[in-house]
Image (cartoon, rainbow, N blue to C red):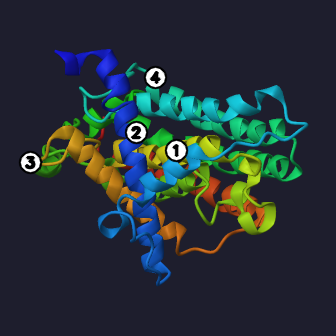
Amino acid sequence: MLADSLLFKLFVFPGTVFSFIIVLFLFWWWRKIGASIQSRYGPKHVGPAGTLQTIADVVKLITKESIVPERASRWFWFMPVFSFVLSFLFLSLIPFSDHWVIIDFDASLIMLFAVMAIEPLFIFLVGWVSYNKYGVAGGERAGIQMLAYEVFLALTFVPVIMLSHSWSLVGIVYGQGVSPTWASPVLHTFVDRGVWFGLVQPLALVLSIIAVMMATEKKPFNLPHAEPEVIYGSSTEYGGPFYALQMLSQFLMGFLGAGLITTLYLGGWALPSVPPALGFVLKTLVVGTIIIWLEHSLPAMRVPHLLEVAWRKLVPLAFLNIFITLIIMEVLGWA
């Protein structure tokens, strides 16, 4: 069947066409929620409830002229493209169902973490090749932020791997839907129905949301793009279609970060009476809405505060969560 082919998954669902549609929706949704929190109208003029405003903005950006700084590197044009390719690689690893996944292998979680770790390097290079001091400052902040979240993000993965006995994202979802072996028969009735890791790992769930907000530069962790301080960070010199491509990558990474939380802690695509891929998208949009709400509700942080929170509070909590997981596995007999 055509839908089973790799080309269909790459270019239709969950690939290029779906990515473009979901990003257009997320940009509109992000504006609407932010406007509601801040007592504004938000987009309302183009299309019903402003639903076509994002499309109008994209058309406007594509038709604008892109001006290259005189001393910019010859790689100036390519960096936004590389950022999009990185986002698409992230997308290819996220399982929308056991059928709708582009790339699945036994160590997909490690590959996904590697992609998240590389992204700040590309953000730095985007600023570096533009030969703009604000862009370089934004890139340096992205590197500092990576040092802040990378360690405890990896530590939050450890309990999930322990409970699911798998490094595969699809295997982790299976670990939440299939009853594990328990020593205590009293709890079989509950566990045989499947249990989301978010229910037995609420601390890891909260830490993962914080880490994803850091990785996707959501406020209060928007240091690389802190407009009042560094104009627009590494993207200061980019305009027109290349700015649109960067925005596409940014919102796609935000959706995929929420999708990662759904996969690890909320049962992935499993949702009663709902088709698997649709269930995954609905769960991801709920998680994404929570992140957007937090983004528009919290004040921005300074760099010293970010590092202090990450290293002195979140990393110890991540280690504590691993210890709690060991106790749960020992006492309740999770094998």
Task: Using the image as rendered, state which of residue 40 and residue 151 is in the foreground.
Answer: 40
Task: Using the image as rendered, state which of residue 223 and residue 251 is in the foreground.
Answer: 251
Viewer-side label of 2, 4 = 2
Q: Which residue is mark 4?
A: 107
For the point 43% across and 52% down, which residue is it? 55
Q: How many marks?
A: 4
- Disc number for residue 19: 2
Q: CA distance from mark 3 to mark 1?
A: 32 Å
Query: What is the x, y in percent for residue 288?
Result: 41, 57
Q: Residues within 10 Å of mark 3 (few under 14, many from 20)?
A: few
Q: Residues within 10 Å of mark 1 (few under 14, many from 20)?
A: many
Q: Which residue is mark 3?
A: 273
The answer to whether marks 2 and 4 mark residues whose Cβ atoms lie closer than 8 Å is no
SS of the residue under disc 2: helix
User: What's the amino acid at mark 2?
Assistant: Ser
- Tell me the quarter of the image containing the N terminus: top left
Q: Residues within 10 Å of mark 4 (few under 14, many from 20)?
A: few
Viewer-side label of 4, 3 = 3
User: What's the amino acid at mark 3?
Assistant: Ser
| Lower position in the chain sequence, tag 3 or tag 2 | 2
SS of the residue under disc 3: loop
The image quadrant of residue 50 is bottom left
Task: Using the image as rendered, state which of residue 190 and residue 136 is in the foreground.
Answer: 136
The answer to whether marks 2 and 1 mark residues whose Cβ atoms lie closer than 8 Å is yes
Q: Answer left or right for 30 relative to 189.
A: right
- Disc number for residue 248: 1
Task: Using the image as rendered, state which of residue 209 and residue 82 is in the foreground.
Answer: 82
Q: CA distance from mark 2 to mark 4?
A: 24 Å
SS of the residue under disc 1: helix
Q: CA distance from mark 4 to mark 3?
A: 30 Å
